[in-house]
Image (cartoon, rainbow, N blue to C red):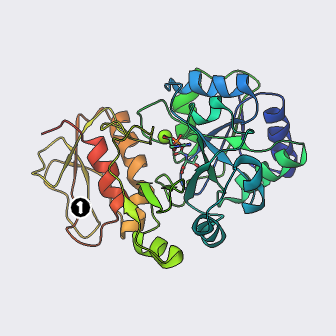
Amino acid sequence: MKIFKDCTEDQITQAAQALIDGHLVAFPTETVYGLGADASNASAVSRVYEVKGRPKDHPLIVHISSQNQMVHWTSQIPDYALKLARTFWPGPLTLILPRSDVAKDFITGGQQSVGLRVPDDPVALELINKFENFGGKGIAAPSANKFGAVSPTTAEAVKEELENDFDMNDIILDNGQCKIGIESTIIDCTKSIPRVVRSGTLTNEMIETIVLRKIEIIEANTSMKFPGSFKSHYAPKAKVKINSETFAGEGFIALSSIPTPSGAVRLISPLTMDDFAKDLYLAFRMADKLDIKVISVLIPNHGVMDAIKDRLQKASYGFK
Ligand code: TXA
Ligand code: MG
């Protein structure tokens, strides 16, 4: 495995070529790091599943350079989906659309839909553009972590998660810490009404303003294979508890205005909820490194993004 820290033009070209040649390239996005493979190459995509340890019926998001590339992958694009793409791409939004013949079962997990996203990170966009110039149609990329574990928000975290499974031709592109830090909002656009199936940093109001109708929010548990549709997901090894008493020796996560309870190990002190999201997964990883067994998280009652609540609930599943 090679790690490119400078992400020079030449290095990004090498990475695009590696994808064309069927190798894996982990790359930064504004949300979390992705584990990329040529979305048209069955054996490359199959390695993504092996490396992640992910069930094969769990579909992957295809990353494209702009909304103009949607036509390759979809058979039909509702007007509201086009509006969402125009407004929020590049950005932390994934659209689920009816698939075309280009989107094979090995990408969609056998479903009749495909997930598409244009990420907002200069390295990611340059990589996708070069890959498309070499004849590629899209880069399949789940978060670059083991199945069920915490998504990586730095290149070091990708290395820790996956280095034992990478081979000498695989590449990690390092562009520092992801600026958003939690996964994209996913909107199912296969029905007449858009449905949010994974919350992210785009609020429901932002989405409704664009689509000019009430959207549906679904709890993950339908027959569709949605992210974190397993109740426990995004979880560190440590147990996570929310808004309960903190004891000495436990890891502690709260806004900077809240003092650390005595004996607790402060993991992060975010000033804002945006910083809370950005640093949350780093804090989870830090706790595991310190061999902390319990992480106590305090979140305010108001002004917390749904995405943070969702990730904390999944991380803390089963813990009383
Ligand atoms: O922010 C993100 O979305 C990151 C970065 C790398 O782009 N990617 C990401 O991928 O979080 P992943 O695979 O960890 O989660 C994407 C989820 C999958 O769990 C899958 O359930 C859902 O998107 N998904 C993808 N294609 C789908 C489809 N055709 N139908 C339903 N769900 C789909
Ligand atoms: Mg993931």
Q: Is mark 1 within 8 Å of ligand 1?
A: no
Residue 13 position (above or below residue 206)? above
Q: Secondary structure at mark 1?
A: loop
Left or right of residue 118: residue 204: left
Residue 202 position (above or below residue 111)? below
Q: Residue 129: horizontal and vertical position, in percent? A: 82, 53
Left or right of residue 88: residue 150: left
**In front here: 106 or 257?**
106
Q: Residue 6: horizontal and vertical position, in percent? A: 75, 49
**In front here: 274 or 142?**
142
Residue 223 position (above or below residue 274)? above
Q: Residue 267: horizontal and vertical position, in percent? A: 32, 50
Crowding at label 1, few (<14), some or many (≥20) Cα neighbours within 10 Å?
some
* Figure quadrant of the N terminus: top right
Farthest residue toward the front? Answer: 192
Left or right of residue 165: residue 317: left
What residue is drawn where x is 26% and y is 47%?
313
Q: Residue 278: horizontal and vertical position, in percent? A: 45, 58
